[in-house]
Image (cartoon, coloured by chain):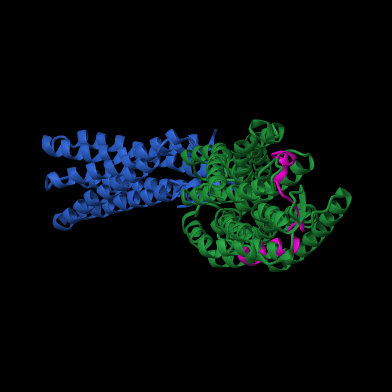
Chain colours: A blue, B green
């Protein structure tokens, strides 16, 4: 053992990027599941939904590992609490994706109006954007540190955060639209299908909510 | 050359001195090059080769040919009247310092070799003549250096890293700025290296001449790096390109560190050997004695052996495990440590290179440069500095007692 190897502790940023990568995969798999769901290919959909569940587990494990290594012993360029809260939010994105997958698995719906189906697919596509942007944001955070907190790199990071916020806004809009169409179509839907659709929408919009919260934490990391 | 084998005590001292030199090579040489290895500027193999050769060259060609028998006047030699005391004491001090270095190296703690030998000398001195023999104000300076070295190192590294990142990393076009400002930083680093080469390696005294050497080296480095950067650096990933520039400089600063370390720290191993040699050849215990070349060569060889046998393992782990350190950070640390040591020693302030480097690492961390530093290890390191002198003193005192009884 030698002091220089111990003095420079392993930084959490690389594993955090890895975690963001898995989270992105989770959301991407969910999107595929939703596309198959729209097509009515429930058998294939189920496979993807179960894969979402597995990936969420992987993300969880990485999160735990990062938490364990992020003891208060470390002296870092960003606040430790901010990192932990960021990680928590980033992990919640995968959790929300898993929640959606669970709802997809509970029933095989028939007679869902096309407009509602389309709205849900759109929400899923936007969720992917949010997850992708969160991944970009954490990669950019690494560059911010690499540059010694350069103004130009911080500006780029703010751009990404703004984009995440606008995606979240868009999903919120889609969510409201979906709720409206559920009630407009209440005669055609059974109460069960209505509950089912609304919960899928709620968990999907949760994905972007958590992405926004994660972005908020990155914003805090850059100021000291 | 006198009949070494005719005098068993001299032979024993030489063996112990060799052991101490080996321990210096194992503990120190690895420390001085680890920022370069960690930042990927050189491979562990190259580091061992460079350190081994340059440490020997530094020790043999630039080691002081006249050395104080008692390092830094830490105890009053006029109180030691019997030559045998100096012989037993030197052996005890050397062995104690080497053992402590060995323990510190095992636990991976960068301790000062100078402070280890000081501890060893204080230990036997106190046992022999009581507390009065110790020059307490000198020892106070050593204590002061535990506090000053890391603080100055940290401040300097903070400033240097901030300045480099402001002028290069944070600019709109880092590669373009690197071409413009990197030669300035490289030039400045060589001013320090040139000046130090005169003072620390050639053991010159005049500041004007020293600065002359420094200016010469600086201007030359500026011109060479300016031309090389102008023609050979392509912009791919901007930060990567900037790191590439500083990577080459780090190789040179590491070479300098090894050379200078050999020239200076060899005295920690051969000083006591020279003292015993003086007693054996002249029968008296003077304060300063001429050191024969072969003793210097032996010290250099010992250090090189330490680097080769133990240092390699250390460097290899360093190279594999410090992946978080980049070349600009490594350069900031090396440059800041060298500058601090130079300025402080000119101001007559007690300072330790090892301690300054650790301070510099923390300074870059404070400038939000290093991604993660282990606070617990910093605490361990600081504790090891505080116990170096007492522990070496206690081991030395015990060894001295035994030698007095046996001898």
Position of the C terminus of chain A, as image quadrant, is: top right
Q: Who is closer to the viewer here, A157 or A203?
A: A157
Q: x, y (%) of residue A214?
A: 40, 38
Q: Residue at x 78, y 59 (%)?
A: B222
Q: Who is closer to the viewer here, B295 or A159?
A: B295
Membership of A189 in magenta stretch: no
Q: Residue at x 61, y 43 (%)?
A: B355
- Locate residue A119 relative to residue B61 in the image: left or right: left
Q: Who is closer to the viewer here, B1 or A24?
A: B1
Examine the rendering and report whether any part of residue B169 can be seen. Answer: no
Q: x, y (%) of residue A101?
A: 21, 46
Membership of B65 in magenta stretch: yes
- Locate residue A17 relative to residue A91 in the image: left or right: right
Q: Residue at x 33, y 42 (%)?
A: A91
Q: x, y (%) of residue A21?
A: 37, 52
- Locate residue B273 relative to residue B311 in the image: left or right: right
Examine the rendering and report whether any part of residue B401 can be seen. Answer: yes
Q: Who is closer to the viewer here, B115 or A72?
A: B115
Main SS, magenta residues: helix
> Which residue extends farthest right?
B208
Q: x, y (%) of residue B70?
A: 70, 46
The answer to whether A103 is drawn above or below residue B54 in the figure is above
Q: How many marks?
A: 0
The answer to whether B119 is drawn above or below residue B130 in the figure is below
Give the extent of the magenta segment.
B51-79
């Amino acid at each position: 053992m030698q002091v220089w190897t111990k003095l420079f502790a392993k930084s959490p940023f690389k594993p955090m990027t890895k975690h963001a990568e898995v989270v992105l995969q989770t959301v991407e798999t969910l999107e595929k599941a939703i596309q198959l769901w729209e097509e009515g290919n429930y058998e294939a959909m189920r496979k993807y939904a179960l894969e979402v569940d597995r990936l969420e587990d992987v993300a969880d494990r990485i999160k735990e590992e990062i938490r364990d290594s992020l003891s208060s012993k470390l002296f870092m360029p960003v606040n430790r609490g901010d990192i932990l809260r960021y990680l928590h939010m980033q992990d919640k994105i995968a959790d929300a994706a898993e929640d959606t997958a669970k709802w997809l698995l509970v029933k095989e719906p028939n007679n869902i109006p096309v407009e509602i189906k389309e709205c849900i697919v759109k929400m899923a596509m936007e969720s992917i954007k949010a997850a992708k942007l969160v991944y970009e944001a954490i990669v950019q955070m690494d560059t911010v540190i690499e540059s010694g907190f350069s103004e130009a790199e911080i500006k780029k990071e703010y751009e990404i955060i703004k984009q995440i916020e606008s995606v979240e806004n868009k999903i919120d809009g889609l969510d409201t639209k979906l709720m409206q169409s559920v009630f407009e179509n209440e005669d055609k839907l059974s109460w069960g299908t209505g509950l089912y659709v609304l919960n899928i929408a709620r968990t999907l919009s949760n994905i972007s909510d958590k992405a926004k919260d994660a972005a908020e934490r990155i914003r805090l990391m850059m100021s000291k | 050359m006198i009949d070494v084998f005719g005098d068993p005590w001299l032979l024993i001292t030489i063996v112990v001195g060799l052991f101490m030199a080996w321990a210096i090579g194992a503990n120190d040489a690895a420390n001085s090059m680890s920022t370069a290895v960690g930042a990927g500027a050189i491979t562990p193999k190259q580091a061992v080769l460079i350190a081994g050769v340059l440490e020997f060259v530094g020790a043999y060609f630039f080691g002081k040919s006249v050395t104080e028998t008692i390092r830094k006047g830490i105890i009053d030699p006029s109180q030691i009247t019997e030559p045998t005391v100096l012989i037993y004491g030197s052996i005890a001090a050397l062995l104690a310092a080497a053992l402590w270095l060995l323990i510190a190296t095992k636990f991976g703690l960068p301790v000062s070799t100078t402070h280890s030998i000081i501890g060893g000398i204080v230990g036997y001195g106190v046992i022999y003549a009581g507390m009065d023999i110790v020059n307490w104000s000198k020892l106070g300076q050593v204590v002061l250096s535990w506090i000053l070295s890391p603080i100055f190192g940290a401040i300097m590294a903070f400033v240097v890293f901030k300045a480099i990142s402001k002028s290069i990393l944070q600019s709109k076009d880092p590669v373009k700025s690197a071409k413009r400002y990197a030669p300035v930083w490289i030039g400045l680093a060589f001013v320090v290296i040139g000046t130090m080469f005169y003072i620390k390696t050639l053991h010159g005294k005049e500041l004007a001449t020293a600065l002359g050497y420094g200016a010469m080296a600086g201007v030359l480095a500026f011109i060479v790096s300016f031309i090389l950067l102008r023609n050979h650096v392509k912009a791919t990933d901007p930060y990567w390109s900037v790191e590439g520039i500083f990577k080459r400089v780090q190789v040179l600063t590491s070479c300098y560190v090894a050379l200078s370390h050999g020239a200076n720290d060899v005295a920690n191993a051969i000083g006591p050997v020279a003292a015993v040699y003086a007693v054996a050849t002249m029968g008296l215990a003077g304060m300063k004695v001429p050191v024969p070349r072969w003793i210097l060569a032996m010290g250099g060889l010992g250090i090189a052996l330490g680097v080769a046998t133990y240092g390699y393992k250390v460097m290899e782990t360093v190279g594999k495990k410090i992946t978080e350190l980049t070349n600009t950070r490594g350069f900031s640390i090396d440059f800041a440590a060298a500058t601090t040591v130079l300025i402080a020693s000119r101001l007559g302030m007690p300072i330790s290179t090892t301690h300054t480097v650790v301070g510099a690492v923390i300074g870059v961390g404070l400038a939000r440069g290093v991604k993660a530093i282990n606070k617990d290890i910093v605490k361990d390191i600081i504790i090891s500095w505080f116990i170096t002198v007492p522990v070496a003193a206690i081991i030395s005192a015990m060894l001295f007692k035994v030698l007095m009884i046996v001898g």
